[in-house]
Image: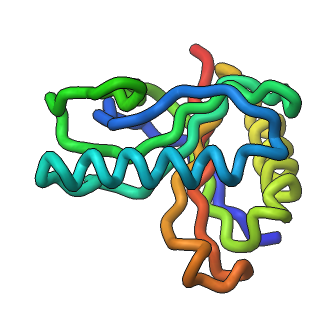
Amino acid sequence: MDIQCEVKERSDMPVMSVRTRCPVAELKPTIGQNYARIATYLAGLGKQPTYAPFVVYYNMDMNDLDVEVGFPAEAGLPGEGEIQANTLPSGKALSAMYTGSYEKMAEAYAVIDHWAKEHNLKYTGVVYEFYHNDPAVTPPEQLITEIVFPLAD
């Protein structure tokens, strides 16, 4: 598996998002429903996402995932109900581009974790995934996901 890892300094990223909890079995519909809600809300404001859609994983409890689902967006937009303006914070992060199916992402995570250990990097415990193409129209083997691990100081 060819994954290019690098440490980057990330800037603050304004987003519109929904933070929720669900078991892993309900993750796909939870993500889809919230993307649709946020996209509709942004369109109603006459706005477009400014970067790829994302999911932030605040834990890895497969029975009770704590996730934030959203789109990067222009700063200063108002939230409404569960859809909130938020910021993904700046800081050093390990970033890796993965091409392939979502079902094989565990292999990508293992490669990234191995690279991090070789470079003595410590994670904060949060993981971002940015999805650079649409699984509804892109073959699974061509899906591009940017996996980002914010690094502890």
- Residue at the extreme top of the image, as rendered: 153
Nearer to us in this view, 16 or 60: 16
Residue visible at 75% across and 29% down? Answer: 65
Q: Quarter of the image containing the C terminus?
A: top right
- Give the side of residue 55 with respect to residue 52, left or right: right
Q: Is residue 63 above or below residue 143?
A: above
- Give the side of residue 70 with respect to residue 21, left or right: left
Nearer to us in this view, 8 or 133: 133
Residue visible at 34% across and 53% down? Answer: 39
Q: Is residue 90 visible?
A: no
Give the total number of marks visible in the rendering: 0
Residue 83 placed where, x, y %? 37, 31
Residue 136 placed where, x, y %? 58, 77
Q: Is residue 74 visible?
A: yes
Query: Looking at the rendering, which quadrant does residue 94 occupy?
Result: top right
- Give the side of residue 88 with respect to residue 105, left or right: left
Q: Quarter of the image containing the N terminus?
A: bottom right
Residue visible at 81% across and 34% down? Answer: 23
Residue visible at 47% across and 32% down? Answer: 18
Residue 50 placed where, x, y %? 26, 53
Colour approach in the figure = rainbow
Q: Is residue 95 above or below residue 60?
A: below
Residue 58 placed where, x, y %? 66, 24
Nearer to us in this view, 60 or 8: 60
